[in-house]
Amino acid sequence: MPDIRDDLHGALSDPDPVRRAQIQMHKPLPKRFYKTVSIGPAEDGGHAILLDGRPVRTPAKRHLTVPTPAAASLLAAEWDAQKDEIDPATMPITRLANTAIDGVSKDIRAVFDDILNFAGTDLLCYRAGEPEGLAARQSEQWDPVITWAAEALGARFILIEGIVHQVQPRAAINGVAEALRAY
């Protein structure tokens, strides 16, 4: 049984109580237990990620499957890149897929509504007037997304300078809604 006195120079000696708590809550990463990573057919017609021929499961115990070979290749590469330990922090595609499978798919209507609510207040529509470098960078990075939304979705958003709320045109929100319904 570990003795609290054994850690006098470790986690318990950190003067920051938040950091102390973080250190004490840190759990060791699971060891890599598999030798091979592959992609196989899923029951739903998608592509399953397999470790030593067995399907990977999400945190909610559902099979980790994706609809396209490209997405499956990205997932397989993440799993194959794990060395001695499995570190979820280095697996953003896996975390995204887990979220979609475990969270989004069980309440798709609520997620749909949340996306539409967010579409009307997206940060891309609110721009800085200054400093000039920031304004230029926002335009450089964000304008292609706004242009794509207008051309591909028919969603023509109003851009403003500052943070005062701007109600977006109903047609723009409807354009986003139509695109979401396709999925």
Image (cartoon, helix red, strand yellow):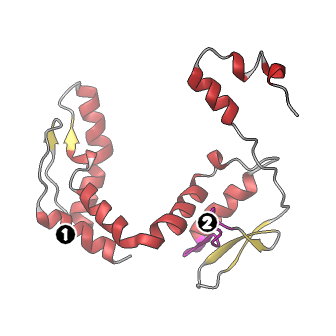
**Residue mark closest to the camera, 1 vs 2:** 2
Q: Label 1 crowding class (10 Å Cα cut-off): few <14, some 14-19, many 20+? A: some
- Amino acid found under the numbered disc labelled 1: Asn
| Most foreground residue, 105 or 16 | 16
| Residue 87 image position (x, y, % from top left) | 70, 47
| Residue 61 image position (x, y, % from top left) | 65, 69
- Write the residue at 13% across / 51% down: 158
Res. 134 image quadrant = top left
- Amino acid found under the numbered disc labelled 2: Ala
| Residue 6 falls left or right of residue 45 | right
Q: Quadrant of the C terminus?
A: bottom left
Q: Is residue 126 magenta?
A: no
- Highlighted range, magenta: 57-69
| Residue 20 image position (x, y, % from top left) | 64, 24
| Residue 5 falls left or right of residue 92 | right
- Write the residue at 64% across / 85% down: 43
- Write the residue at 31% across / 61% down: 115
- Compared with 34, 42 (above or below) is below
| Residue 182 falls left or right of residue 98 | left
| Most foreground residue, 91 or 6 | 6
Q: Quadrant of the N terminus?
A: top right
| Most foreground residue, 111 or 19 | 19
Kindly state the secondary structure of the residue where label 1 is placed. Answer: helix
Residue identified by numbered label 2: 60
Residue identified by numbered label 1: 174
Kindly state the secondary structure of the residue where label 2 is placed. Answer: loop
Report the Cα–Cα distance between label 1 and label 2: 33 Å
Residue 154 visible somewhere in the drawing: no
Q: Label 2 crowding class (10 Å Cα cut-off): few <14, some 14-19, many 20+? A: few
| Residue 60 image position (x, y, % from top left) | 61, 66
